[in-house]
Amino acid sequence: MTGITGLNKKHNFVLVLRDADVVAAALREALADASPEERPGLERAVALVGATAATTEARLRADWVRSRLAAVGFTGDVSSIAAVKALRQAEKKLSLLAAVELQKDAVAEQA
């Protein structure tokens, strides 16, 4: 995943940018030309990228929320008001509504 955009005080939509397809294509091309010694590692890489590409957008948003909370040292309950505050501290342009929506994704994905 490249990033999450679209969240600010005027916009509350989430656009998840993924580049897994580009990476997967490059790995498959490398695998086609790989020596026997390189094949096992490249095959594993192709499998990992494939698994990552299959991740839902809700899961990606939840992972992003957890990473942003960790970046500001938040270790409490993700469903708490303190988590929303910490998320907005981590991402200054995040509106309250957007932070709450992202928090809901994070809580739903941990259940």
Image (spheres, rainbow, N blue to C red):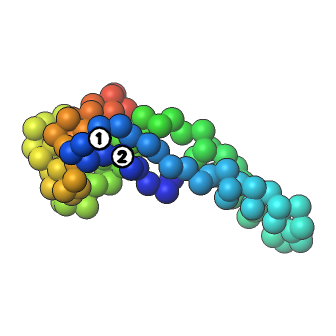
Q: Position of residue 64 (x, y in %)?
A: 36, 49
On the image, which quarter does residue 84 sit in?
top left
Mark 2 is surrounded, within 10 Å at the Cα level, by few (under 14), some (14 to 19) or many (20 or more) other residues, namely some
The answer to whether residue 64 shows anywhere in this view is: yes
Distance of label 2 from label 1 (alpha carbons): 6 Å
| Tag 2 near tag 1, CB within 8 Å | yes
From the viewer's perspective, tell me whether residue 62 is left or right of residue 47. left
Q: Amino acid at mark 2?
A: Gly
On the image, which quarter does residue 109 sit in?
top left
On the image, which quarter does residue 23 sit in?
bottom right
- Residue drawn at x 42%, y 34% as measured from the top left: 58
Q: Position of residue 17 (x, y in %)?
A: 50, 49
From the viewer's perspective, tell me whether residue 99 is left or right of residue 31. left
Q: Which residue is mark 1?
A: 11
Q: Position of residue 2 (x, y in %)?
A: 49, 56
Q: Amino acid at mark 1?
A: His
Task: Describe the element under mark 1 as helix, strand or loop.
Answer: loop
- Residue drawn at x 84%, y 71% as measured from the top left: 37
Q: Which residue is mark 2?
A: 6
Q: Position of residue 50 (x, y in %)?
A: 67, 46
